Image (cartoon, helix red, strand yellow):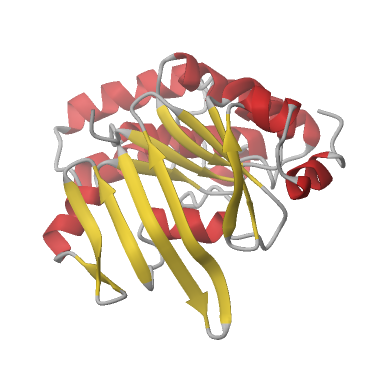
């Protein structure tokens, strides 16, 4: 079966700083991939390249049958805008800092893109949005604006907003890093529920116990390369690389 997303030979530099040094990553339908590693290891840059927020210098990227970038002559050649739009419709992205529209209500934040980007029927979109609000444990918050919500509630709105676009997969960039510890659990529980529903997800996280419990596969990145990759049992329980052991020794999980 064709992978939902595939990256091969991904390279990205900012000036003289080579952040990604030939990364390969393939994600299958229903898989939950956790990407862990130290700050500056390239995790977030990989996610930004995968979600088209940054462009690869070299390498290829595809979402199913949509080729986003192909490697030609040592450079990444990107597809035309129409193909890039098709690729963007395949995934949703949840940011660290929510990125909600501050002047819009919870309901409008969730409804905005399906109506204006996907041109879907307003009545159908509103029904779906209200369903997602209930699913996220936010019933009663429909009319509130983001500043009236806790960080955990705002992050759950941003997950609902991503799901409203009916993506094939979700990307999460450190979804709990801006939250107090007591609010972290409520967001992680939502992601666990999505995993139980076989939502395809790639999660950059520093929550090791969470990565261990929810992921099918763990990718440990450092220095712009994939140092180790395997099942949570293997990576956390019996890592083969010294660098992985050093990194994980700082965590009790």
| 232 or 88, nearer to the observer | 232
- 126 sits left or right of 45 in the view: left
Answer above or below: position of 50 versus 19. above
Please provide percent x and percent y for residue 187.
Answer: 61, 29
Seen at 50% across and 22% down, the residue is 136
Q: Residue 18 versus residue 55: which sits nearer the camera? A: 18
What's the residue at 24%, 29% (across, down)? 125
Q: In the picture, which quadrant includes the C terminus?
A: top right
Percent position (x, y) of residue 174? 61, 45
186 relative to 89, above or below: above
Q: Residue furthest bottom?
A: 15
| Residue found at the far top of this picture | 196
**Residue 89 in picture, x, y percent from top left:** 24, 44
Q: Name which residue lies at 52% across and 28% down.
A: 141
Residue 17 vs 228, above or below: the answer is below
Point 18% across, 43% down: residue: 118
Image quarter of the N terminus: top left
Q: Quadrant of residue 192?
A: top right
> Does residue 123 appear left or right of residue 202 in this picture?
left
Residue 107 visible in image: no
Residue nearer the viewer, 212 or 83: 212
Between 91 and 66, the residue placed more toward the observer is: 66
Q: Is residue 72 above or below residue 191?
A: below
Residue 151 is left or right of residue 190, and the answer is: right
Residue 128: x %, y % from top left: 29, 23
- Residue 208 can be seen, yes or no: yes
């Amino acid at each position: 079966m064709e992978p939902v997303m595939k990256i091969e030979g991904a390279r990205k530099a900012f000036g003289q700083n080579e952040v990604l040094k030939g990364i390969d990553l393939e994600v299958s339908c229903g898989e939950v991939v956790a990407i862990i590693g130290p700050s500056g290891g390239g995790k977030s840059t990989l996610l930004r390249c995968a979600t088209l927020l940054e462009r690869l210098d070299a390498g290829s990227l595809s979402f199913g049958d949509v080729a986003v970038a192909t490697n030609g002559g040592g450079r990444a050649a990107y597809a035309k805008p129409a193909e890039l739009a098709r690729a963007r419709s395949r995934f949703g992205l949840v940011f660290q800092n929510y990125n909600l529209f501050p002047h819009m209500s919870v309901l409008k934040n969730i409804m905005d893109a399906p109506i204006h980007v996907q041109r879907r029927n307003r009545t159908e979109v509103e029904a779906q949005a209200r369903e997602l609000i209930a699913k996220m444990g936010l019933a009663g918050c429909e009319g509130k604006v983001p500043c009236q919500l806790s960080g955990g509630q705002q992050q759950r709105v941003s997950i609902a907003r991503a799901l409203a676009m009916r993506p094939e997969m979700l990307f999460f960039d450190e979804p709990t890093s801006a939250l107090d510890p007591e609010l972290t659990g409520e967001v992680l529980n939502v992601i666990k529920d999505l995993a139980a529903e076989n939502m395809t997800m790639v999660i950059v996280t520093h929550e090791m116990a969470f990565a261990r419990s929810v992921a099918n596969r763990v990718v440990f990145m450092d220095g712009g390369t994939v140092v180790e990759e395997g099942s949570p049992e293997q990576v956390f329980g019996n890592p083969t690389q010294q660098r992985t052991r050093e990194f994980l020794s700082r965590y009790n999980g």
